[in-house]
Image: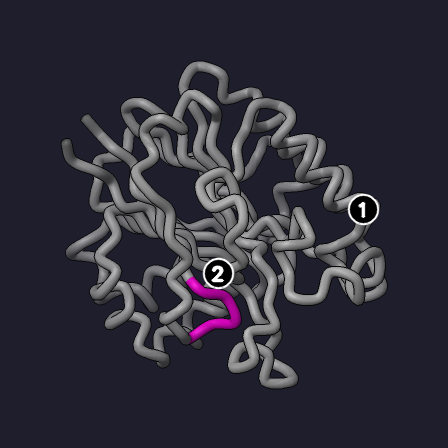
Amino acid sequence: MSNLSIVTWNVNGIRAIMKKEFEESVAAIDPDILMLQETKATTEEVRKSLDSFSGKYEIVANESKGRKGYSGTAILSRKAVKSVSSDMNMEEHDQEGRVLTAELDDFYLVNVYTPNSGQGMKRLDYRQKWDRDFLHYLESLSDKPVLVGGDLNVAHQPIDLARPKANYNKTSGYTQEEIDGMSNILNAGYRDVFRERYPEEQQFTYWNYMFNARARNVGWRIDYFIARESLMNRIEDISILNQYMGSDHCPVELRLSTS
């Protein structure tokens, strides 16, 4: 039985991380498919930055249409992909390059960078609409199982952040509205793969650059793989690869059996 290595990583700027041993990190992880969020670059700039990967991977990107150098997603794949589509076909949500969907032979792979609710929760209303509409989009992919990977910008349970009491309803990413948005996805037949596999494990994927948070491991788990129930029996393992630096997030690897 062979398996497919799929990695998600919020790189917090593709041009910045390329200066921080990104190529060496990717070579060490050796994923078949690499999903990136927060590339902060145009499609052309992503391709130029990743030029050294072009012989090994097919590269597709989605860029922010309004604010340049903001948001953005990319997929690098050395596995044959039938097609790739950008966005959700919802104009309100399709301005920031936050979704890329790859159709493989037997499932859809959705790369997502969920909007942050912002300082002072200024975008919380928008975020709630995004969560509802993103679930609607996932449900429209009805002819194959769906696997979602990316930065979902929410800690779903108290175990998913170092200081739940101090942050609850005070910090973007841990409000009841955002928690409910995630719960609605899971209640629709999806599974948080890491939490299903490791129900009592506290590991983080994001650490604020300030206050020496990573060294003190004062972090959040906001980067996920979310799978339809029908895919769960194919998942070999999931790992949070917090040894890899270069961003305020670390990569997460999922291994999926292919035969």
Direction from residue 142 to residue 59 in the image, left or right: left
Q: Is residue 41 visible?
A: no
Circles 1 and 2 in contact, beta carbons < 8 Å: no
**Label 2: how many residues lie within 10 Å, few (<14), some (14-19) or many (20+)?**
many
Position above or below: 245 against 139: below
Q: Is residue 246 visible?
A: yes
The amino acid type, in three-letter code, at marker 2 is: Asn
Question: Judging from the image, what secondary structure is the residue with disc 1 in?
Answer: helix
Return the residue nearer the eye: 18 or 65.
18
Residue 198 within the magenta-colored segment of the rendering:
no
Q: Which residues are magenta?
A: 246-250
* Mark 1, residue position: 176
Task: Please identify the quadrant where the C terminus is shown.
Answer: top left
Residue most toward the top? 143
Residue drawn at the location 22% of the way across and 30% of the way down? 258
Q: Residue 10 got which mark?
A: 2
Return the residue nearer the eye: 247 or 62.
247
